[in-house]
Amino acid sequence: MAANIGIQGTSPAPLNYGPPNLSFTNFGNMTDGTPLVKRDQMSALRDAMTVVRGLHSMTFGGEYRRVQSNPTTDTYGRGSYVFTGLLTSGFDNNEVLLPGTGFDFADFLFGFPNQAKIRYGSSANYFRSSAYSAYAVDDWKVRSNLSLNLGLRYEYFSPYTEKYDRLSNLDLAPGVTGAAVVTPGQSGPYTGAFPRALIDGDHKNFSPRGPLPGAPRQRNTWWCAPDTASFTTAPFTGNCRAISPASRRLRRASRSSPASTMRCAWPPASPVPAPS
């Protein structure tokens, strides 16, 4: 639809067919949902064993999980425009905005967006992660009416990597006085080598467990008052953003250049080959 109304440079993929997203300052926005195709897979191998020795019933186990997350999406495949009224505003000789001038809908009618975004190209990402866990639990019957259930669990969740290393992060200088973009296989100019995932994993995920079930006698009546204290950990998925060198990300913002219009905010795209 975006191409049919004369907007150039949008994604030719059928997945991204539809109107562009329009944002205004004084009016409601016109936005359409972003298509997403997600193919996830998880494989797991786990085992456990129980050993009984006298008053102790001990359980040991472990698990390995391999996670694959394969999303296909283009955040701005149809283009996104922001109209603020800047292009129809008046300015004095000192380039100061004159009050009472400028109207966002007028900018829209002229086809002059204050901001234009597009992003598409190799839109499929292939995230990979592994998770390891091991635990030991001892159910100790101290007395006939008192048991101790003690245990410890360890887990490690590896940060997501991308199959074709299409990830990026920032290497920050001390005091955030500078920043540099790094990709897998590169070293940052400020902090040195980065892992392939570009973030470090947490190797200290220990989870103790300490329930205290019991059955004390009170006035010829039995009752059970379990008291449990346990701690668990969960993987941090966060907002893992991947970018591809073949992706197209352009931003134009100008109040004086008529070349930056809705029709030609981006140059026509050339086909981008998919990774092999």
Image: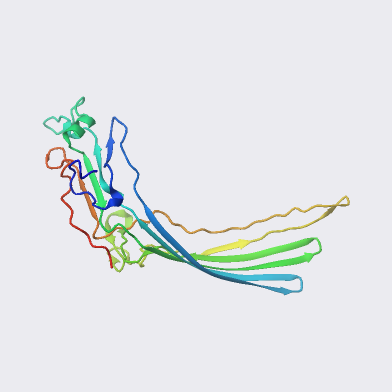
Q: Quadrant of the C terminus?
A: bottom left
Q: How many marks can you see?
A: 0
Residue 15 placement (x, y as % from top left) = 30, 51
Q: Quadrant of residue 158?
A: bottom left
Q: Which of 243 and 37 is in front in this view?
A: 37
Q: Which of 77 and 247 is in front in this view?
A: 77
Residue 261, percent from left and from top: 16, 40
Q: In the shown orientation, is residue 221 left or right of residue 16?
A: right
Q: Residue furthest right?
A: 220
Q: Quick check: 219 above or below 97? A: below
Residue furthest to the top in view is: 100
Is residue 203 visible in the rendered structure shown here? no
The residue lying at 76 percent from left, 57 percent from top is 214
Residue at image x 63%, y 61%? 209
Q: Quadrant of the N terminus?
A: top left
Q: In this view, does 53 lie to the left or right of 24?
A: right
Residue 219, percent across and down?
A: 88, 50
Given residues 174 and 96, the one toward you in this image is: 96
Residue 198 position in % (x across, y down): 35, 63
Q: What colour scheme has been applied to the protein in the rendered image?
A: rainbow
* Residue pictured at 75% horizontal, 53% vertical: 225
Q: Can residue 87 be seen in this view?
A: yes
Looking at the image, residue 139 lies above or below residue 104: below
Q: In this view, does 16 lie above or below 43?
A: above
